[in-house]
Amino acid sequence: MEQILDLHIHSKYSRACSPQLTLPNIEQTCRRKGVDIIATGDFTYPAWFKHIKEELEEIQQTGLFQLKKGDDAIKFILSTELSLVYKDDIKCRRIHLVLHAPSLEAVAELNAFLDQHYNIRSDGRPILGMTAPALVKLCLDIDPRFLIYPAHIWTPWYSVFGSKSGFDTLAECFKEQTKNIYAIETGLSSDPAMNWRLTALDNLTILSNSDAHSLANIGREANIFNMATVTYDEIYRIITSQDKKNIVQTIEFYPEEGMYHYDGHRHCQISFEPTITKKHKGICPVCKKPLVIGVMNRVEELADRPTGAQSPQAVSFIKLVELDKIIAQSLGLKSRQSKQVATVYDRMIKHLGSELNILMKVDLETVKQIAGEKIALGVSHVRLGQLDIQPGFDGQYGQINVFSHEEQAINQQIKLL
């Protein structure tokens, strides 16, 4: 059975996250988005773990969960992200790891230990002063079916390969526990092709997740698995065995839209691709301080394959732009939160099915009949990759324009009529 999985999101208890991120709201959003299996997020936070136990029930001993007042169309996997900050090799390391747990009992045991030794009550994504190998060992001693892997592997801060506080190899980070790391998460600022450039990553499953801090961002990155049984153990098996046959595809954000794709300084409005950064010797020409080195540059630094090379373990991927963004740009609107956008979005979901189904599968003529020619053209541009792109840098999201400057001008004129 084909399933779409988004394995990394947050709850309303994480810093800078929407108060609308409750389990019932997440479940309803997944129905509209087309996500079948969704992370709970933040299971170490006591109030959220209480919410999980109150709202969810296990589906027939599968290790996956559903709303007690719902059905099993949308399934939850116990997940969280942890922030580790510690000194290693005389350097301060700051990395984020994704965890998946096989049971409520395993989560409860992990939480009890962490609550005794660290502060897990201040944020949904707690900061722990423990090393990555120690965390992996702790989890696997509790239950060997825990899954642990690096989150958004390339972002400058808080990632394993980050230019600010990361490592140059996974072995440097995880040491004797490296053998128990089976996957990496691309993050918004990289895609699988960028990760294929490192032979050291060939034997790891490449996952893409939304890291959503709001309902609207659920499913912006995801994974498509073909699952013999829809269970935690099958997810575990597919990821740990790097089962290419059953990892159908990953769904990707355009990496240029990520906040750290290029190098730069946001306050100085300086944005460079790696060759230009090199010419400036990594120094901002405006303020004369070191530039924030982005993902593209860091990949270039560590890569041992040329651009365009493909890993022998490569799985296909597709890049998408969220439907509400396409609608907003088609209507000549700057905000995807407008009532006009919501009205059109709701009509499309009602008649055409889920968002991901519309973006990937629905016939364009059918899209045109329900939503109009302009939106159908926008969907076509996304499928063909015919976009105007301004890469993000230094914490500033990039701009992905579905229409050319000329088409944008026409859309704006239509809006004013």
Image: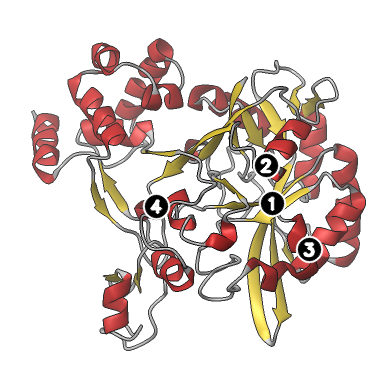
The mark found on residue 239 in the picture is 2
Question: Answer yes or no: do the residues labelled 2 and 1 have beta carbons within 8 Å?
Answer: yes
Q: Quadrant of the N terminus?
A: top right
User: Could you tell me which residue is drawn at 62 percent across and 45 percent down?
Assistant: 8
Q: Give the Cα distance between marks 3 and 1.
A: 11 Å
Q: Earlier in the sequence, mark 4 or mark 1?
A: 1
The residue at which mark 1 appears reads as: 182
Q: Is residue 135 above or below residue 358?
A: below
Identity, as a three-letter code, of the amino acid under mark 4: Pro
User: Where residue 5 sits in the image (x, y, percent)?
Assistant: 60, 33
Helix, strand or loop at mark 1: loop
User: Where residue 136 sits in the image (x, y, percent)?
Assistant: 80, 59
Q: In this view, does 285 lie above or below 377?
A: below
User: Could you tell me which residue is drawn at 39 percent across and 14 percent down?
Assistant: 352
Q: Which of marks 4 and 2 is nearer the N terminus?
A: 2
Q: Count residues near mark 1 (Cα–Cα under 10 Å), then give few for <14, some for 14-19, many for 20+.
A: many
Q: Give the Cα distance between marks 2 and 1.
A: 7 Å
Q: Quadrant of the C terminus?
A: top left
Identity, as a three-letter code, of the amino acid under mark 1: Tyr
Helix, strand or loop at mark 4: helix
Report how many numbered discs are placed on residues in the image.
Answer: 4
Q: In which quarter of the image is residue 338?
A: top left
Observer-side mark, 4 or 2, equals: 2
Q: Earlier in the sequence, mark 2 or mark 3?
A: 3
Identity, as a three-letter code, of the amino acid under mark 3: Gln
The residue at which mark 3 appears reads as: 177
The residue at which mark 4 appears reads as: 255
Residue 213 appearing in the image: no
